[in-house]
Amino acid sequence: MTKADDAELLEVGGRTVRISSPSKPYFTRGVQLTKLDIVRYFLAVAPGALRGIVDRPIVLKRFVNGAEAEPFYQKRAPSDLPEWMRTVTLSFPSGRTAEEVVVDDAAGLAWIVNLGCMELHPHPVRTADLDHPDELRVDLDPQPGVAWTDVRAVAMEVKALLDELGLVAWPKTSGSRGIHINVRIEPRWSFTEVRRAALALARAVEKRCSLASSKWWKEERHGVFLDYNQNAKDRTTCSAYSVRPLPDARVSTPLRWDEVMTCDPADFTVLTMPDRFAKIGDPHAAMDKNAGVLDALLEMAARDEAEGIGDAPWPPHFRKMEGEPERVQPSKSRTAAAKKKVGKADGGEIDPATATVAKKGRRQPTMPLIVIAQSPDKSAAEVGLERWKQQHPEAAALLAPDDVLTDRMRGSAYVWYRIRINLRNVPEELRPAQGVPDPDDDPTRAWREAKEIS
């Protein structure tokens, strides 16, 4: 390792990788770690980290100002790509294409980490076949207030079902509150078919386990949500050994199944993982040798459809898909009760495009949701929520943990946060009215207002 112009030059696998601003603080609120510390961490666990990303197009999630600042997503490869790194042309549901980075070795891993990529976001395809995933991804996303013990219980239910279907499952902590379970599959099915299989899996687990939910809309979920849409094209999740932007620099950690019911995600950090990796190696080392088939899951999907259980909502940036139900969140949908209640005497009319009730020109929600705060700064939005609770203590005292909905809104070049509250557990006479969100910093407002003017 040598120094050059406030940079560290690392020799990695026979290649020289320049690490710019190596002493730049990346973590300061808990552990103290620099950019170079993060690079060295990834090199210490490189065989495991590469297993999840090698020969795959990668979305670059760049924490250029460290873990405590907002990252941004970059699909297109940087213009200064080293000559020894390659790209592949990936197409998106919008019809657009992009040259995305492909990592082949530890030097390539160090190079993207230098860009601020602590979370590694590979697509579930290999470069030789970009249309057929070789991985089914089960993302267990606990709702607010759900205990870690419940997440682990749902994970074990997923394993039991996959065992019955002859599929080998590989668990890892998400690095936050959830668990990811990956299944290597033969690259024979399209993204649509893999997502269909994941939806059938989610619904089957929901039937077997009261803690599990397959519902797409947050206001309908309970317990642990099985996010089937992570298998839609152009969706990615962080891969094994990724570093998450939490104060303790927690790591998404591959587990053996006998560790799932006893592990604590807080034990797996940038500081502890190299020693664990050196002692036990990668628990997922045999992953690529166990590619399975989706026939049984697709048969389950066909049975669901024969019983009238059709498709479920797709992510919002997808076009309306054949067989997809109405893509309107339940709080804005017209229920049978609302249909009876709102009539001509109330000035109510039915909007055929959205199937919501319009009363005197305004949509009438069927669930009592109000927007509390919206801001690109998550902490500012959370402070706004606390102010609202102080202003409305009676209502706040009646809220269940999953009545607070924090939405991470993602635009083409920005991320912002919206906090809503479901007042379903608050008697009508105690429900605060919708006020001006505090803060009310919606980065899409100018665009929407300009569109309305035009």
Image (cartoon, grey):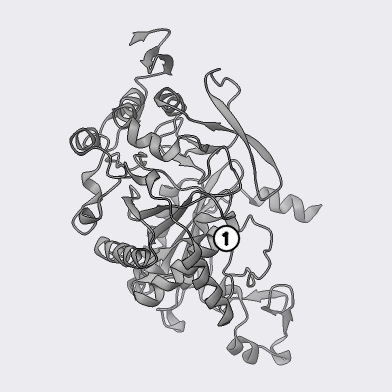
Helix, strand or loop at mark 1: helix
- Counting from the top left corner in percent of width and height, residue 83 is at 56, 17
* 428 lies above or below 302: below
- Quadrant of res 137: bottom left
Residue at image point 38% right, 18% down? 13
Between residues 322 and 389, which one lies in front from this camera angle?
A: 322
Q: Is residue 57 left or right of residue 327?
A: left
Whether residue 197 can be seen here: yes
Locate residue 202: give its quadrant. Answer: bottom left
The residue pinned by badge 1 equals 193
In this orientation, does residue 436 appear? no
Q: Farthest residue in the right direction?
A: 454
Which residue is depicted at the point 43% across and 17% down?
17
Residue 109 in percent (x, y) is at: 42, 28
- Which amino acid type is shown beneath numbered disc 1? Glu
Q: Nearer the viewer, residue 350 or 39?
A: 39
The relative height of residue 394 versus residue 120 in the rendered view (above or below) is below
393 relative position to 409: left or right: left
- Left or right: 145 with respect to 314? left
Where does residue 152 sit, x and y in percent of width and height? 27, 61
Coordinates of residue 126 in the picture (x, y in percent): 53, 40
Quadrant containing the N terminus is top left
Other-residue count near label 1 (Cα within 10 Å), few / some / many at <14 / 14–19 / ≥20: some
Q: Residue at x 57, y 49 (%)?
A: 132
Instruction: Report the number of numbered marks.
Output: 1
Image height check: is 209 above or below 447?
A: below
Say if 230 sits above or below 62 in the image.
below
